[in-house]
Image (cartoon, rainbow, N blue to C red):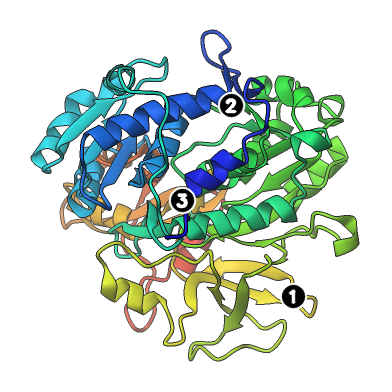
C-alpha cells in the first residue's frame, strides 16, 4: 500500500542536521529549545503510548489543552500512530464539550490538568476509555505515561484518503459539524502553499516562522505549522499572542501569519516599528476579512504588503493573493486567485455559473476539499452539488483576472477576532434564559475584533430581563468569544412581510455599538 501518512511526509522534510533548533519558545517561564531530533523522539514516545492503548482503527483523539509545543507534538504523534486528531477550542465549556464527545465518540481525551475536574467526568460519562492531561509547563499524565515508551516509532501506513483530523465548525442550526479531513487533503494543500508562498529551505538561507496563532484551528495548526515543518523551518513559538513580545522577536523571523485582529493589535503597539519588520519576507492574513484600512495602514507603517488568503476548515486553503511580483499585485479587499489544483466558481441560486463580476455563491473542488461531515450524511449531501462542488457558504464575485472578492456569507456567520460564531447557537441559548421571549444575534463592526457579537432580546410579557445578567448567565454556558458583548432589550425585532427577522436592519440599527 502507498504510504500516504502526512507525518511521514513531514518527517522526510526535516533538515539533515537533526540537532538544529526546530522550535524556540518565546513566552514560557524559560526559553525552551527543541531540535528536530527532539520533535522526532518526543512524538515517537507519544505515538508508542497511543499504540500501546490498542485503539480501534480510526479512533479519535480529542484534545482540549492550552497551546504548547507538546500539544503540537501530540498532534504529530496522533498522525504518526494513524489515529484521527480532533482539536477543540480551549474556550469551550461543559455543554459544548459534552456535545463534541457525544458526537465524535473519541477513544482518548486529552485536557489541561486544571480542567480535568470537569472534563474527566464528562469524558467518562461519554464512554471515553482514556483521559490524559497535558499542561503548558510540560506537566500532566500524558508525558509521564509516554516517557516510559521507546523514542523510535515506524509511522502507521495510511492511504491518502484515510482520515487524519476532524475539525468542528459551528453549524447554522447551532449544532457543530465535524469536517473530516484526510491525510491527502492536508498534505496536498501544504505542498501547494510551500511552493506558492516561496518558502525558503534551510539551504536557501531558511525561513523562520513566528507562530503566535492558536493550534486548535486550521490557520495555526495546518497552514502555519505544516508550512514550517514541511520546509524544515525554525519556529519562534508563542503560546499566546502579545503584540509587544511578538514585535520584539520579529527581527529574528521572516514569515508571520495572523488573523486581522492580530494585525490591528500590532499596529497599535509602539514596539512594532518599521525597523523590526525590515528582515521579514512575508506577512499573511486570513480567517476573516482584512479591512482595506488595515492593509493600507500596515503598508504605510512597515513597507510590507500583507498577503491575504482565503480558506476554511472544510477545505483548508482555497485562494491566495500573489506572492511573486510577476504574478500581479496584492489587492486590498480581495482574497486572490484559486490556488493551483483548486477549481472555483461563483453560481446563482440554481447552481448555474454567474457572469464575470456578478455576485453569487462560491463553490469549490479540489484535492484539498474535505470528505464530508462526520456522521451527518444529509448535511454533507446538502452542501455538495450533484457534480460534487462544495458550497462554501461564502458569497463573492470573480473579476476577469480570476481574482475573488468575498462580499458576505450566506450562512449568517459572525467572525470575531478570527473565531466563528453562528448566531443560531447563541440565540437558542438566549431564548432559554429567564424573561426572554425571543432573540436575534448579529455581528457589527468592532475596532479590535473585526466584528463584535451583539444581541437583541424581546422580553416575555410582564418581565424585564437585564442585559448584563443575561451576559453573565451565558458566560457560564458557552465559550466567551460567542457571548454577546452587549444585549439590547427591544419591544420587537425588525421583521419582513414573511415574518422573518431582518438581520440586515438589526445590524444597521446596532451598527455603531462599538464604533462612533
Ligand atoms: P473557518 O472554518 O473557521 O476557517 O472559517 C472559514 C470562514 O472564514 C470562511 O468560510 C469565510 O467566511 C471566512 N474567511 C476565511 N478567510 C477569509 C478572508 N481572507 N476573507 C474573508 N473571509 C474569510
| In the foreground, 474 or 123 | 123
Q: How far across and how far down the image is residue 40, in percent?
A: 50, 29
Question: Label 2 near label 1: C-beta < 8 Å?
Answer: no
To which residue does mark 1 refer? 402
| Quadrant housing residue 192 | bottom right
Marks counted in the figure total 3
Q: Quadrant of ligand 1?
A: bottom right
Mark closest to the chain's N terminus, 1 or 3: 3
Mark closest to the chain's N terminus, 1 or 2: 2
Q: Is residue 171 visible?
A: yes
To which residue does mark 3 refer? 5
Q: Which mark is residue 36?
A: 2
Q: Nearer the viewer, mark 1 or mark 3?
A: 3
Asked which secondary structure carries label 3, the reply is: loop
Could you give the CA–CA distance between mark 1 and mark 2, rounded to whole angstroms?
Answer: 40 Å
Q: Residue at x 82, y 30 (%)?
A: 277
- Most extreme residue toward the front is 1
Q: Residue at x 62, y 68 (%)?
A: 407
| Quadrant housing residue 406 | bottom right
Question: Label 3 near label 2: C-beta < 8 Å?
Answer: no
Disc 2 crowd rating (10 Å Cα; few below 14, some 14-19, many 20+) is: many
Q: How far across and how far down the image is residue 241, in percent?
A: 57, 28
In this view, 371 is above or below 484: below
Amino acid at each position: 500500500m502507498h504510504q500516504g501518512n502526512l507525518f511521514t511526509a513531514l518527517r522526510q522534510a526535516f533538515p539533515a542536521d537533526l540537532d538544529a533548533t526546530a522550535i524556540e519558545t518565546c513566552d514560557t517561564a524559560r526559553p525552551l529549545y527543541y531540535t528536530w531530533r527532539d520533535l522526532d523522539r518526543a512524538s515517537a514516545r507519544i505515538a508508542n503510548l497511543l499504540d500501546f492503548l490498542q485503539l480501534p482503527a480510526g479512533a479519535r483523539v480529542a484534545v482540549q489543552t492550552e497551546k504548547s509545543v507538546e500539544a503540537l507534538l501530540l498532534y504529530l504523534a496522533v498522525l504518526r500512530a494513524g489515529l484521527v486528531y480532533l482539536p477543540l477550542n480551549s474556550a469551550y465549556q461543559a455543554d459544548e464539550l459534552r456535545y463534541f464527545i457525544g458526537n465524535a465518540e473519541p477513544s482518548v481525551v486529552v485536557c489541561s490538568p486544571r480542567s480535568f475536574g470537569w472534563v474527566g467526568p464528562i469524558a467518562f460519562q461519554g464512554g471515553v476509555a482514556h483521559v490524559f492531561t497535558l499542561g503548558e509547563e510540560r506537566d500532566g499524565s500524558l508525558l509521564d505515561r509516554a516517557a516510559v515508551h521507546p523514542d523510535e516509532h515506524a509511522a502507521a501506513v495510511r492511504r491518502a484518503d484515510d482520515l487524519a483530523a476532524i475539525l468542528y465548525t459551528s453549524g447554522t442550526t447551532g449544532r457543530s459539524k465535524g469536517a473530516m479531513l484526510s491525510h491527502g487533503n492536508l498534505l496536498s494543500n501544504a505542498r501547494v502553499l510551500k511552493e506558492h508562498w516561496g518558502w525558503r529551505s534551510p539551504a536557501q538561507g531558511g525561513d523562520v516562522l513566528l507562530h503566535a496563532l492558536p493550534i486548535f484551528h486550521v490557520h495555526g495548526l495546518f497552514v502555519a505549522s505544516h508550512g514550517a515543518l514541511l520546509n524544515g523551518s525554525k519556529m519562534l513559538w508563542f503560546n499566546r499572542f502579545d503584540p509587544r513580545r511578538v514585535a520584539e522577536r520579529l527581527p529574528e523571523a521572516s514569515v508571520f501569519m495572523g488573523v486581522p485582529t492580530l494585525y490591528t493589535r500590532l499596529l497599535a503597539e509602539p514596539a512594532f516599528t518599521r525597523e523590526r519588520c525590515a528582515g521579514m519576507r512575508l506577512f499573511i492574513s486570513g480567517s476573516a476579512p482584512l479591512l482595506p484600512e488595515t492593509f493600507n495602514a500596515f503598508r504605510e507603517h512597515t513597507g510590507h504588503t500583507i498577503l491575504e488568503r482565503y480558506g476554511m476548515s472544510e477545505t483548508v486553503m482555497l485562494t491566495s493573493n500573489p506572492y511573486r511580483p510577476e504574478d500581479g499585485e496584492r489587492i486590498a479587499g480581495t482574497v486572490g486567485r484559486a490556488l493551483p489544483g483548486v477549481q472555483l466558481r461563483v453560481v446563482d441560486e440554481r447552481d448555474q455559473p454567474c457572469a464575470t463580476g456578478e455576485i453569487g455563491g462560491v463553490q469549490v473542488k479540489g484535492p484539498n476539499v474535505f470528505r464530508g461531515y462526520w456522521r451527518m450524511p444529509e448535511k454533507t449531501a446538502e452542501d455538495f452539488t450533484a457534480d460534487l462542488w462544495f458550497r462554501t457558504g461564502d458569497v463573492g464575485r470573480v473579476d476577469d483576472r480570476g481574482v475573488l472578492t468575498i462580499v458576505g456569507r450566506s450562512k449568517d456567520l459572525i467572525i470575531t477576532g478570527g473565531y466563528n460564531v453562528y448566531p443560531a447557537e447563541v440565540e437558542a441559548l438566549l431564548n432559554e434564559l429567564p424573561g426572554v421571549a425571543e432573540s436575534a444575534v448579529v455581528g457589527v463592526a468592532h475596532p479590535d475584533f473585526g466584528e463584535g457579537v451583539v444581541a437583541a432580546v424581546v422580553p416575555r410579557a410582564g418581565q424585564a430581563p437585564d442585559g448584563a445578567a443575561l451576559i453573565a448567565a451565558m458566560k457560564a454556558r458557552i465559550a466567551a468569544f460567542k457571548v454577546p458583548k452587549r444585549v439590547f432589550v427591544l419591544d420587537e425585532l425588525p421583521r419582513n412581510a414573511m415574518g422573518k427577522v431582518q438581520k440586515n436592519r438589526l445590524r444597521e440599527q446596532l451598527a455603531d455599538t462599538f464604533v462612533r
